[in-house]
Amino acid sequence: MKAELSARMKVTLYGLLCVLLIPFVFPTWWMVTSSFKPISDIFAFPPQLLPQRYDWTTYSKVFELQPFVQQYWNSAYIAAVVTIGTMIISSMAGYAFARIRFPFANTMFMIVLLGLLIPSEVTIVPLFQMFLQAGLVNTHWPLILVPMFGAPSIFATFVMRQFFVTLPVELEEAARVDGLGRFKIFVRIALPLAKPALASVAIFTFLHSWNLFLEPIVFLSSAEKFTLPQALTQYTDAYGGPMWNIQLAAATLTALPVLIVFIIAQKQFVEGLAHTGLKG
Amino acid sequence: MAVAQDHVPSDARSTSPFWTVARRDSLAGFLFIAPQLIGVIVFVLVPLGLVFWYSLHEWNVLANTFTYTGSENYRMLLSDPSIVRVLGATAIFSVGLVIFNLSLALLLAVLLNQRLPGITVFRTLFFSPVVVSLVAWTIVWGFLLQKNGGINGMLLVFGMEGPNWLREETTAMISVIVVQVFKNVGLNMILFLAALQGVPKELYEAARIDGAPPFKQFRRITLPLISPTILLTSIITIVGSLQVFAQIAVLTQGGPGLSTTVLVYYLYQQAFQFHFFGYGSTLSILLFVIVAVLTFAQWQMRKRIVFYES
Amino acid sequence: MAEVTLSQVRKSYGAVDVIHGVDLEIRDGEFVVLVGPSGCGKSTLLRMVAGLETITDGDVRIGDRIVNDLDPKDRDIAMVFQSYALYPHMTVATNMGFSLEHRGGSKTEIAERVNWAAGILGLEKLLERYPRQLSGGQRQRVAMGRAIVRNPQVFLFDEPLSNLDAKLRVVMRGEIKALHQRLKTTTIYVTHDQVEAMTMADKIVVLNGGRVEQIGAPLDLYDRPANQFVASFIGSPAMNFINGTITHDGFVAPGIVLTLPEGVRGLHDRKVVYGIRPEHFTVDDSGVTMEVLLVEPMGSETQVTMKLGETTITGVFRERIALTPGSTIRVRPELASVHLFAADSGQRLN
């Protein structure tokens, strides 16, 4: 690519990267370490990069003050359902738009793409009204259905379509000669080969659902129905001020598992997302 | 896509089955897209129609009134003293976010595009905030940005007194932008990195033989060749910035004053805190128009600005 | 094994006709090659036999069934694709057994058939590999294995060798031919390479612009091409053509007079195209004088580009003749190998 860097250039570059890294890494570090500090040390001066004293009761309070296990489960199962559902819906639609010739396919593709212009923030009022009429407010249905069919899933369909377009036609023709019908071609040939695209769809769909905030606070009202992002903001004192150490402990519990999965599978994450070019 | 017309032979024979390949394929096509299409209609397009319908009504949920008022809400929008400040905050937030995000992403991508041992570790770390739960990330930053929080503590160690970041108009806006940028810049960084790696290295070799200095190589070769990615990321980022809600809700609640009240947050307040569903719907239409116009504008710009498209 | 009959087969995409009424009879066990320039419709025709393209009009018969409306899987055919189309996510064994799996064969039956096919093609040691771990020639063999494994009535090959390098192509050509001699399955083979057509076919079908130009045994096409297109397409280097008129003196073109064989005197004053293959010249002092433009010695033979009147002529000589560009040479076209075509229609006249 470029010419070999001189040793001095290398040192400068490493130094620059380390400085730039601070705002990316330090908050996570600060979150984890502060969550172990007693409340009295949390705003101590000078700032303690490592806890001087440990207060383990903070973590038990996370579970005492709110049904945190239930909320964790809510977030996890909703994200799982949305992710699997989106993978099924978007791979089928993406495959059909890429590979099957049928009447009005173009028109229908345009209609679906139109949905990309309409984030759920725009339609939140009628969505609330619709789910209210259906008696589904304060249930998890809106949190599942809206992303599974709205803009995130349309984006997934687009990603899948782009992938299937590149799949060699002759593979499917060989499968037809081998005796497979359309559905079997999809399941046995197209889908197994689409694993990289499916992986990126899974990753961004999961992250989107896991981070969902507006929908939960609009649709959910009881603590045992809450999802994690919403639950984190609920650890407040009588005056509405945040109980920092408990919030940070809960935030740590929320962030760490995904972070660990990411570090284990970082290659798939980074490359998967690079291939789709998704939203910021 | 052309419609696959199945030809009926001129001497149509009785053996000709009804379910020809083309017909079966059409059926399969409809069935495959049905979930997505029906879902989009029910959960996106119908609500969009409804939001327009609602915007023509005065609708107070608490008072339980739903009256057709025509363009009243739109007139109200034009005379709403807050809306100028809200749109101003939205514009500052979006533009600031895009500029800061893209320049940082490009800088990081260029730095990470060097062949150095351990560079993938840096890549992973710069990317890591993307997978940290959004609200968790925001809470930590909120904690760091407190008057007596970590950042001001660090500044004080060096003898500087920091402002009350989230309680002053200018610093509050800077804070929400910065928090959002560090959260998601990794995505754009990865996209830029992929684009940089797609530039044929022969071009750089040719430029070096022609005697072009590194900066000129960057300006005359790298930038034009990655311009499609720059455009793509800028539109993704700007449309995404219009949907930023959690960060505002957690960090500043739109304050101080209206200084960080972006359109989505204002919409949420009007509809779900003050229960003005009609006016909230009008604001939704405004948001939709802005998103649509920006998307359309990028579509047009693609032809003019992008030098090169693979 | 079966006969394949095409009668008045047509194909059109909207208003554009790509196949204009093709008639073709293929005998049981015959190896037929469809050959023609790209875009001539040969692949489309093959894919219509396979059932991958619909038939606009006419009938395709395999054995005693009209298969127009049948799915590929119900036609009892097997196909080898240009890209081989091996399933990347399956092993060689699974690839080969995949079609049997969908026809309800038992596991042991499938394994038996796969082993039988692998044995014929020398793939026994590769059965557990994935396609990406194979060389081009091995992939080609697996594609053939997948075709023969279920013993179909007809094999269809769509330019199967075009992705191989020149040397391997010759080897695989031989293997396909040997396979056919062993299995005696009716085969339709599409290629744009006339050498493949000549060396492999029992019968060649030359296609051009969606029409059949000529059907015949390889040597018949070489010796007596029905028209100028076939004449130019079959044989390498290509046949020389000279535009001119037939007179009392023989064939006359600006600066050229050539003797004609007997029996063409009746074509007086006609505008014709005189055709002669490069290999049908003899060096002879009583021959026509030509200017030497270029000499290309190949070892076994020498290819000489010459100028005759205003026409550039290619000659191939077995003997090693000492020539330099700019000198002249006297050569005599072999009378028995002269082809005459009508200048307007291109049809053969003699």
Image (tube, rainbow, N blue to C red):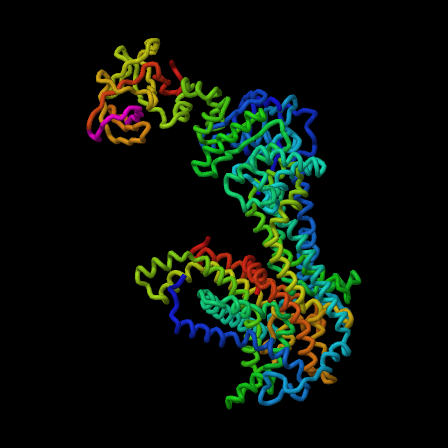
Q: In x, y percent, where is residue A243?
A: 70, 82
Residue B6 occupies which quadrant of the picture? Answer: top right
Q: Which residues are magenta?
A: C312-326
Query: Considering the image in quadrants, where does the C terminus of chain C appear?
Result: top left
Residue occupying the point 58% across, 69% down: B128
**Quadrant hosting residue A272:** bottom right
In the displayed structure, C31 sits above or below B76; it is above
Q: Quadrant of the N terminus of chain C?
A: top right
Residue closer to the observer: C45 or C336: C336
Taking the image as shown, residue A217 lies to the left or right of residue A108, namely right
Frontmost residue, A143 versus C308: C308
Task: Please give left or right for residue A9 compared with residue B63 in the image.
Answer: left
Q: Quadrant of residue A159?
A: bottom right
Check if residue C320 falls in the magenta segment: yes
Residue C328 inside the magenta-drawn segment: no
Q: Position of residue C101 (x, y in %)?
A: 68, 38
Residue at the image position 55 percent from the left and 47 percent from the top: A166
Foreground residue among C306 and C92? C92
Question: Residue pushed farthest left?
Answer: C327
**Can residue B288 be spotted in the picture?**
yes
User: How far across and down, in percent of the image, does residue C44 sit?
Assistant: 53, 32
Instruction: Give the main secondary structure of the magenta stretch.
Output: loop
Q: Position of residue C124 (x, y in %)?
A: 59, 39
The single residue placed furthest to the front in the displayed view is: C125
